[in-house]
Amino acid sequence: MPDYDAIVVGTGQSGPALARRLVAAGRKVAIIERKLFGGTCVNTGCTPTKTLIASAYAAHVVRRAADYGVRLEGTINVDMKAVKARKDAVVAPSRNGVERSLKTLQGCTVYQGHGRFVAEKKVAVNDAELSADRIFLNVGARAAIPPIPGLDRVPYLTNSSMMDIDFLPAHLVILGGSYVGLEFAQAYRRFGSDVTVIELGARLISREDEDVSRAVADFLNDEGIDVRVDSKVVSLQKQGNAIAVTVESGGKSSQIVGTHVLVAIGRRPNTDDLGLDRAGIATDAHGYIQVDDQLRTNVPGIWAMGDCNGRGAFTHTSWNDFEIVAANLLDNDQRRVSDRITAYALYTDPPLGRAGMTEAEVRKAGKPALIATLAMEDVSRAYEKGETKGFMKILVDRDSKKILGASFLGLSGDEVIHSVLDVMYAKAPYTVIQRAMHIHPTVSEFIPTMLGDLKPLQ
């Protein structure tokens, strides 16, 4: 007989929630965690980074106080030890809460150690071998470290080790101009660091439309961040107490000397030390566990959820993975990954809220479409708050009148996007929002206005 009805490996967003549902359904569950309870989001992702960003925003507003008629005397200083202490104080209750809730959950046994498959339905952890008919993998991902010459011979930071620093880097050089890199770039510039961002691609955040990439680059440059695009990092080497980064761009070579380097060039799944081959679990060329539309692996009775399955790299997609698995297993509700709409945010200031297709994707699909855009400087709420960077853009199917996608780069864009997203899930025409009466003064009130001014996408 198996030792458990189910084994859950990893305590990120999916794992603990599924363990609770399984226990509530009368299942005997084991859950395994090798390091920090709560996974990336709680410990090195969403919670701590957005806490740091909040501190950086406060510093930014204080420096702009005179713009609002507020006079401050003396030098403005950022106490990085206090910033880190605040971050730690926000993170600890979440991490400890996950650990405490699992360890006190009747019917659930917690194993702290590294879990590895030793057979198809058997996982070894510490000195024990556990078996179960159902196994759920929620092992997450980590920073990818590219094979750049010299990188292994210099000290470098990742999104995880950034959580440990309590000082201000004099000059932070960031390798990678996408979501993780840009959030740290702006935060540390606002804390007081010199910051250089080096991006291999022709523009920042290349999955976004060109107008979005350009607007983000513009406001980062306005804050004094040195943005280098179309630039290849050739090598790194120690130069006294500094680090010299050699970059090639446009056929020319140059050197950027910084005090610290942050590597933010993508993520890789934590699947290379799970013994997946012993269970016969298939992965793709990048190490992501291959799953079907209900998150089942190729081995019956084994599922993969969260970042390790390559079907989404966000906390909300991991949580939705849990909902899909639980619905299919326990609720007789046939939910699928393909039912969800792409949605995420970039937490720069201003933030970017995204849902559905980009303009480039709509054009590539050849869909007859309508489009509306609005500069944030024309939004009264943004103007009143003195935060007018960015713009909003919505795309609509010309024939069905359904919303295809939206990009809201501006004040509260990460929140306002849900007004559009919910209508998209309802499969309702855009006229539902267009005819709605929104509250003034808000950013959301301008969505009906935009939808009343749609033009053919040329």
Image: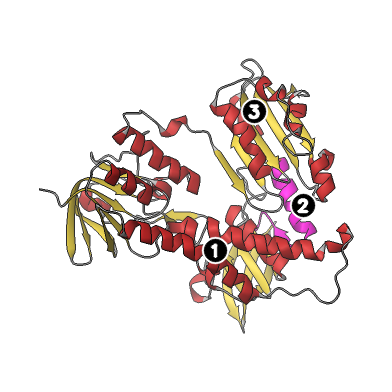
Q: Can residue 416 be seen from the camera position used here?
A: yes
From the image, tell me which residue sits under label 3: 363
Tell me the CA gap for discs 1 and 2: 32 Å
Residue placed most toward the observer, 29 or 300: 29
Up-down: is 26 above or below 240?
above
Residue 393 on image: x %, y %: 71, 34
For marks 2 and 3, the one nearer the N-term is 2
Residue 378 on image: x %, y %: 84, 39
- Classed neighbour count for the residue bearing mark 2: other residues with Cα under 10 Å, few (<14), some (14–19), many (≥20): some
CB-based contact (under 8 Å), mark 1 and mark 2: no
Label of residue 218 in the image: 2
- Classed neighbour count for the residue bearing mark 1: other residues with Cα under 10 Å, few (<14), some (14–19), many (≥20): some
- Residue shown at 60% from the left, 27% from the top: 423
Considering every residue shown, the one lying at the far top of the view is 399
- The amino acid pointed to by label 2 is Asp
Tell me the magenta residue range. Answer: 211-231
Q: Can residue 145 be seen from the camera position used here?
A: no
Tag 3 secondary structure? helix
